[in-house]
Every structure is written in C-alpha cells, then in structure tokens.
Image (cartoon, rainbow, N blue to C red):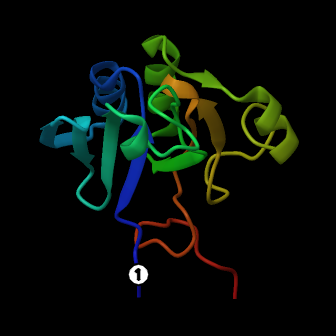
Amino acid sequence: MAQIRHIAIQTQDEEATAHFYMENFGLKMVRRLDSDRTAGYFLTDGHINLAILRFKNDVVAGAERGTGWSGIHHIGFQVDDLEETTEKLSTSGNAKPRDDINVALGLGAGGAPAGHGNVEVRYIGPDNVNFDVSETGWVGTPTNRVKAHA
C-alpha cells in the first residue's frame, strides 16, 4: 500500500519557513539544497519528508505558478500535547488560527474537543500554508489514537 512520505511547500524564504517547522514541530533537517534550480531543505519527522523549496526559475516552479508563488493547500500534524503546541504557535508570530474554517468545520474554540479524531484545529502559517493540528491523529495512520466504534 502506498504511504504519504513527501510534501513540498514552495516559499519565498526557505530559511524562515524551515525554521518555523523545525522549531514548532521538532522536525529535523536531513539535507540542504542549493542548486541553480532550487534552494531549500528536506525536513523529516521520521515518517514524512517535508521539502521547503524556493525555486529559482519559472520552468522548475511550473508555468502555472512561477517563482513568485508560495504555498500548498494544507498539511496535518499530529502532536503529543495540543495545548503545548497551541501555546508555541501563538507565541511564534507566524501562525494564526483559521477561525473562518474552524467555525465552518466545527473545530477549535467551542467546536470539536481534543480527542475526537483527525483535526482539532486549523491554522495558517508562513507562506499562507494551511495546516491541521491533531492530538489524536488521522484515521488510517499507525499513530491514530481514536479507535472506531464496534
């Protein structure tokens, strides 16, 4: 069975973006990239490769986006302690809760409590990347802490 092992974020500031994910989620740098096409980092949590990339030409970046575009739709992080992570994110200066999405999905303050499964809260971080934070994890993953009801 295929498993997700790589997510790429296109950015205009690879240093700041890599630092954000390493500091707030404990990701480790496994490789620095710097070629005539791309600069950036490969980060990992031991299961997923997260590429933080600044493309140096429009062809490599993709004509539909070009070198000036940044972002992906969203990614998700399972954390050990939702409250601790919420505090880190609030003091980082680089993350804001997506109150519009959280309300629409019934997440976050007044919405789904920690432990319900999948995402507990959606944020927006550097480069307008939306990300989910979950203490319980996602269904179908080996670290999911919510068991299906029999």
Type of amino acid at the residue the image marks with label 1: Ala
Q: Is residue 134 visible?
A: no
Q: Nearer the viewer, residue 80 or 64?
A: 64
Q: Is residue 73 left or right of residue 137?
A: right
Residue under the point 62% across and 58% down? 118
Q: Quadrant of residue 142?
A: bottom left
Residue count near mark 1 (Cα–Cα under 10 Å), binned few <14, some 14–19, many ≥20 = few
State the quadrant of the C terminus. Answer: bottom right
The spot of residue 127 in percent (x, y) is 51, 26
Q: Nearer the viewer, residue 61 or 94?
A: 61
Q: Is residue 17 above or below residue 93?
A: below
Farthest right residue in view: 104
The spot of residue 133 in percent (x, y) is 55, 43
Residue under the point 77% across and 37% down? 102
Q: Is residue 57 above or below residue 2?
A: above
The spot of residue 4 in percent (x, y) is 41, 68
The spot of residue 36 in percent (x, y) is 18, 35
Which residue is tagged 1?
2
